[in-house]
Image: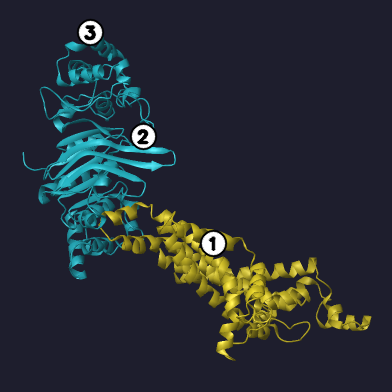
Chain colours: A cyan, B yellow
Amino acid sequence: MSEPLLSVEQLRVSFETDDGIVHAVDGVSYQVEIGKTLGIVGESGSGKSVSSLTTLGLTRGPRTRIDGRMVFGGRDLVALPDAELRRVRGNEIAMIFQDPLSSLHPFYRVGWQLIEAVLAHRKVSKSAARARAIELLELVGIPDPQRRVDQYPHEFSGGMRQRAMIAMALVNEPQLLIADEPTTALDVTVQAQILALLNDLQKRLGMAIIIITHDLGVVAEIADEIAVMYAGRIVEYATTQEIFSSPQHPYTWGLLRSIPRLDIPRGEELVPIAGRPPSLINRPSGCYFHPRCPYVQDEHRRIDPQREPLADAPGHTVACLLAPEVRTRIWRGLASGQTPAELRHLASAGSAGSPLSTTSAAGTSQRDRLANSGE
Amino acid sequence: MGRYIIRRILWGIVLLILVSALTFILFYVFPAGNPAILRAGRNANQQDIAYITKELGLNKPIYTQFFDYMKNIFLHFDFGFSYYSQEPVLSLITNRLPATLSLTIGAVVLWVIAGIPVGIISAIKRGTFFDRAAMGIALTFVSMPVFWLALIVLYLFASDIGRFPILPGANAYVGLTVNPLKWFESLILPWIVLAATQAAIYSRLLRGNLLEVMGEDYIRTARAKGLPERRVIWRHGVRSAITPVVTVLGLDIGALLGGAVLTETVFSIHGIGLLNYNAILESDFPIVQGTVLLAAMFIIVANIVVDIGYAYLDPRVHYS
């Protein structure tokens, strides 16, 4: 395997607030390969945006604590001084955001904002920067870029604004593009166009993409690998194919069942995940997902699961205390249309059976930890 | 845009007529005294008073008086004569205007120079000693009544009565054309007094605006582009945060040009404010009417200028 473009190791980000310390990102590790796409999926408050903003140093502040490493091109971005990190931002790593209207400055022409991005990193003439801006607007499919370059953001439609944001991000040919909910604020038809555009630009320019979303449907089309985040942690990490064919974590199941699908009869289409994301100040004990998990067992309230590889697919890791064969049976049941309530007994059966007979690496080590902790 | 301006000006004229009518009614319903008796002096007899009443047109019905007044303004640009000095109101006002202009412009320059940088630095260095100290001082100045601050300043620094007599105090104003140096010296204390409160208000306003703007998504975008922080603050943050301040500034200038009554009174600067104040005391109605109209006109013009200026500052604003 080649050297990854970005390697995040045990990243922790916490914010000191008046209510207490918010543990927004809690020991997250992932890698992004050159030219590949990683999808980070989770609800709001799962830490998915914070981990990416941290890549660019945009979460730095007097009340922020950042630990861990983010190695990009041989440098640790966490340790990089502000001035050096600034040269990475918008140059080697660029970012686009959720709401393109509020993300563009309302008082400046779109072209001016693109030119500014060029001049922030390149010593070129203003006219060369302008030519580059027009070239990029054309590349992202904005018609009549010669005229559009002199318009203000409010004169653009939503989809065009996001295209302009993408143009601005790509103007310095970054190796990594971070797209934070790039389609959430857009109409469904425009969403598909923007995703297709990102896919196409990636093929042409060869950059890696991290796409952050709450919608597994979005990453299905574009991501090579998917990290599912919950309460500041990655709870499942696998190739896109694996996530959709054999998802392992009850939270991932919940996300999958909440995607609108055409092949499921009306009325059972959308199944929301019960409950709310947990407080990141006072996090639940044991498995962070246990208060919302339909398959929760007593010990899950005490044991904090670690992400461990599956025996038959080492690239697929999951942080779940259920035994692998139990998970497989539950997912089969869910996929065939059964409800969590009907399948709940599988979880307790697996647990009550013979706990130590579980042979997977994950099951054994979690139980060992319990034994060692003296409970 | 042209249409819009014309429409605004026409509405402004309608508004001025309404303001005049209101002033007329207020003086009619709550007379400060009978101008004819005041005009006639102590030893006047009934005949004198009756004569003066007729002379001043006070025996006519109020609507006739108002109509005559409006007619003279629109046809002859004649704002009437003072009941006392018989001087034309228009020339009284034009004689007094330079003093008010001097006071206003100097104070505006001073409070902009003081208030805006303090507001910006406070926002950027939020929570630091500078921020706390500056906002504490600002709160103190906001809470001080102008007339009280003026008296304190006179007590401390006026060359005649001050504990530290370093600057000319009350009644020292001379015109710019008469003696520029003395003009400048005499206005330093009034400028400071008038600017102190405003500088405090502006610094707090700008600080609040800038703090809010720095949390906007487009500021995050500017940082994500890799711009130097200085540029993020000035070109992206301050550019947005200053816009509402410019609006308030325009309106404040308009209001002050109508006469800074308190400051002019305490410092005996013979500007529009003091003219108006004395006229009210003496029931010199034509002067009150004239100064009120002038003040209303400045405010209306300032409003129009601010609204037009806003379209230049914020490209999203369009008038048609």
User: Could you tell me which chain the residue with mark 3 belongs to?
Assistant: A
- Residue A176 drawn at (x, y percent): 17, 48
Looking at the picture, do discs 1 and 3 lie on one chain? no
In this rendering, the label closer to the viewer, 1 or 3: 1
Q: Which residue has dot 2 on it?
A: A280
Q: Nearer the viewer, residue A109 or B253?
A: B253
Q: Is B109 situated left or right of A339 in this image?
A: right
The secondary structure type at the circle numbered 3 is: loop
Mark 3 and 2 residues: CB-CB less than 8 Å, in contact?
no
Quadrant position of residue B243: bottom left
The secondary structure type at the circle numbered 2 is: loop
Q: Estimate the spatial distance between the alpha carbons at disc 1 and disc 3, rounded to whole Å.
A: 72 Å
Label 1 neighbour load within 10 Å: few <14, some 14-19, many 20+: many
- Residue A245 drawn at (x, y percent): 16, 26
Residue type at mark 2?
Leu
Q: Residue at x 18, y 38 (%)?
A: A30
Quarter of the N terminus of chain A within the rendering = top left
Looking at the picture, do discs 1 and 2 lie on one chain? no
Q: Which residue has dot 1 on it?
A: B138
- Find residue B9 and name its label: none
| Up-down relation of residue A225 to residue B249 (above or below) | above
Q: Nearer the viewer, residue A29 or B72?
A: A29
- Find residue A353 and name its label: 3
Q: Estimate the spatial distance between the alpha carbons at disc 1 and disc 2, rounded to whole Å.
A: 38 Å
Quarter of the C terminus of chain A within the rendering = top left
Residue type at mark 1?
Ala
Looking at the picture, do discs 3 and 2 lie on one chain? yes
The secondary structure type at the circle numbered 1 is: helix
